[in-house]
Amino acid sequence: METINIQVDTEVARTYHSANPEQQQKVQALMNLWLKRALQVTQLQTTMDQLSDEAEANGLTPDILRSILDE
């Protein structure tokens, strides 16, 4: 595991620092899972945007795609 710094509001920081080590580990595990999923969604969206841009650059407009899908 590696350590990263993420800014949070004062209340969150205070509550985290006052939690016992077991609670802190649970929060760390949850944040790790959440960040993995959030970054995967971001990567997927970026890939989809790139594919969309490439398709449009090659002449596949949303109207043409709709027409193809309606067939």
Image (spheres, rainbow, N blue to C red):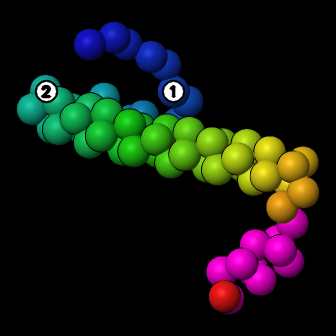
**Residue that appears at 49% across and 19% down:** 5
Image: 3 above or below 14:
above
| Res 65 → quadrant | bottom right
Q: What residue did someone put label 1 on?
A: 6
Q: Residue furthest left?
A: 22
**Can residue 18 be seen in the rendering of this structure?**
no
Image: 19 above or below 4:
below
Foreground pick, 37 / 69? 69
Measured as percent of width and height from the top left, residue 42 is found at 57, 44
- Numbered disc 1: secondary structure: loop
Q: What residue did someone put label 2 on?
A: 21
Q: What secondary structure do most residues of the magenta stretch adopt?
A: helix
**Residue that appears at 66% across and 80% down:** 69
Measured as percent of width and height from the top left, residue 71 is found at 66, 88
Amino acid type, label 2: Pro
Q: Which span is picked out in magenta?
A: 61-70
- In the displayed structure, does residue 41 sit left or right of residue 21? right
**Residue that appears at 46% across and 41% down:** 40
